[in-house]
Image: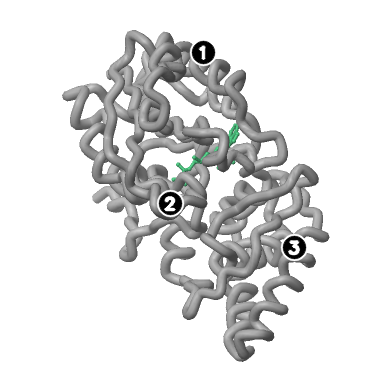
Amino acid sequence: MAALPLTPIIPARPFLKWAGGKSQLLCEFGGRLPGKKTGDRNVTGFVEPFVGGGAMFFYFRQRFVSAESTICDINPELILAYRVIRQAADDLIAELGIIDSAFREKDDREKEAFYYRMRDTFNETKTANGSGMPGPGEIRHVAQLIFLNHTCYNGLFRVNKKGRFNVPFGRYKNPDILNCDNIRAASHLLEKTRIIQGDFVACRKYVDDETFVYLDPPYRPLSATASFTSYSPTGFTDRDQKRLARFYKALDRKGAMVMLSNSDPLTENNGDSFLEDLYAGFRIERVPARRMINCKGGRRGAVSELIVTNY
Ligand SMILES: C[S@@+](CC[C@H](N)C(=O)[O-])C[C@H]1O[C@@H](n2cnc3c(N)ncnc32)[C@H](O)[C@@H]1O
């Protein structure tokens, strides 16, 4: 009798908080996945070129267990974290355990100082991002990243122009620094996943007519003040948005099933049809969204998200 595929007992979810993370929108996206919309079209591959925290990757991977998966992001620290979780989950848990205990035994003032020392150490450590087995330095670096991500203000990863992580301390009462079950469940789902660090176009060769591609690029800022595009020192410009639309069309010509999400420019600016023009001819839908990274707290909840599908 053929062995049944092993599925994790604990469902995996993003192990980092990530600006623009899609956990809140999975119910909207779930109903629009190709399996439900395209009848009996086979989905044997999944490609996510802007994986970020991976909300869609974990969601999809647990439903389409056998789909061959590829994830990619331009952020080297993030991609290193995926590699370490895939290949060295237990060593990572051990490193994180050391940091977690050291942090918890401190009082509030000492916790803040501990955070800034860790931020300096993190910024001073250069990590190679090769494809072999991650070494102890890389594992420690990822443990520091996870710690900083769960204790920093608003749980975001933001770097300055020199590429230095610059988010202040977050003062959370009980941050979820060490979640062993989730790290192990994520590691299990990453086992057969190709992990690429680079620009989204690098994914092109992994797409065919049975692939579902989910594209979630950095938001096009809704207004000059609402901008959060600093996942990487270079940012994501309107030129990149146009380059991405050409990529979308190339994947469409390959016969892939493609879903893209982005901020809805019409939310704040009635005349702005930039994205609608780029994706004219495809199905464009709007769903209500709660934008988490927004310095104007009162405006949370007032935006919608565009979803562009070609199926
Ligand atoms: C909106 S976030 C994705 C969020 C993700 N869907 C989630 O649920 O967490 C956009 C991601 O695109 C990445 N990115 C920016 N420019 C890129 C590029 N040129 N190619 C690939 N990834 C890029 C950023 O590092 C960021 O992680």
Badge 1, how many Cα within 10 Å: few under 14, some, many 20+?
some
What is the CA distance from the residue labelled 2 to the residue labelled 1?
A: 29 Å
What is the CA distance from the residue labelled 1 to the residue labelled 3?
A: 37 Å
Q: Mark 2 points at which residue?
A: 292
Q: Image height check: is 288 above or below 275?
A: below
Q: Name the residue under label 1.
A: 246
Residue 35, horizontal then vertical, whole percent? 23, 31
Residue 187, horizontal then vertical, whole percent? 48, 57
Residue 286, horizontal then vertical, whole percent? 28, 30
Labelled pair 2, 3 in contact (Cβ < 8 Å): no
- Give the quadrant of residue 94: bottom right
Residue 2, horizontal then vertical, whole percent? 28, 48
Q: Name the residue under label 3.
A: 122
Residue 100 placement, left or right of 222? right
Nearest the viewer among 186 and 144 is 144
Residue 17 placement, left or right of 199? left
* Label 1 secondary element: helix
| Some atom of ligand 1 lies within 8 Å of the CB belonging to the residue at label 3 | no
Badge 2, how many Cα within 10 Å: few under 14, some, many 20+?
some
Q: Image height check: is 260 above or below 97?
A: above
Q: In which quarter of the image is ligand 1?
A: top right
Tell me which amino acid carries mark 2: Met
Q: Which of marks 2 and 1 is in front?
A: 2
Q: Can residue 261 be seen in this view?
A: no
